[in-house]
Image: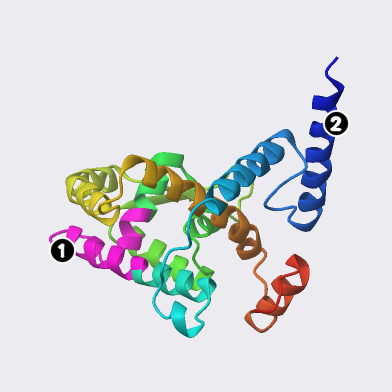
Amino acid sequence: MNFALIKDFMTLLEQFESEANIYPDVYPATIEGFKTWISDQETTQQADTFDEPYWEGKENGRTPESAINTLLVHLNRYAKTYSKSAISDSEFSTQEDFIYLINLKAFGEMTKMALIKKNIHDKPVGMLIITRLLRQGLVEQTDSDLDKRSKLIRISERGLLTLEKQMEKIRQATNIVAGNLNHKEKMDLIRILNKLDRFHYPIFSRNINSDQLINTVYDEYAFENS
């Protein structure tokens, strides 16, 4: 029996349990959580071997967190301009319209709130989108067999046809957003964005009041003040 290997594994497991206690939503105490943690450690170690990139304002003390926030906002705005172009000659009013349909096509019927949460929207915004799609006949709603108070939403035949008619331009817009990244860079970016999504989605799902959100997250996740 390789006792040195077992000792190394136990050390790793102790480190994982420590992180899992701090970030239970990011690293659940399961084999999948452990595998995710191992993958993230490897990515971090690889990143540590690279020189820091330049970002605007770095020489004046601008933090990497500030640069990340700004770049994410910019990328979201770029993506919206391409999406707007992709639906310019369609029945869709916004990119959210076709994203709701794509989710319904991919995952099947679901409750209104499940659909809204999947798209990271507040309830009022999500309900407006669903109401618009219902009015256009792009989705249909039925009573839930499990809860008569809930309505299930599914994409209609008309919705499928409308979506398919526009999918070529939507795919083109998607390809443009990925820009000039090569395959490895795309895979690295997916891993990083998945890690951020796994961190933020459980917090978003709790619907914490805006006036308490920042303090709650800072306290629970032990962020250091910048």
Asked if residue 87 lies in the magenta stretch, the reply is yes
Q: Nearer the viewer, residue 91 or 28?
A: 28
Q: Residues within 10 Å of mark 1 (few under 14, many from 20)?
A: some
The residue that appears at 50% across and 46% down in the rendered structure is: 191
The residue that appears at 59% across and 50% down in the rendered structure is: 44
Q: Quadrant of residue 136?
A: bottom left
Q: Which residue is mark 1?
A: 88
The amino acid marked with disc number 2 is Lys
Cα gap from disc 1 to disc 2, whole angstroms:
61 Å
Q: Main secondary structure of the magenta part?
A: helix
Residue 147 in percent (x, y) is at 63, 49
- Look at discs 1 and 2 and give the one toward the viewer: 2
The residue that appears at 36% across and 67% down in the rendered structure is: 76
Q: Which residues are magenta?
A: 75-99
Q: Element under label 1?
A: loop
Q: Which residue is mark 2?
A: 7
Q: In screen coordinates, is 18 left or right of 169? A: right
Q: Nearer the viewer, residue 139 or 58?
A: 58
The vertical placement of 151 against 106, above or below, is: below
**Residue closest to the far top:** 1
Q: Which quadrant is the N terminus positioned in?
A: top right
Residue 199 in percent (x, y) is at 62, 57
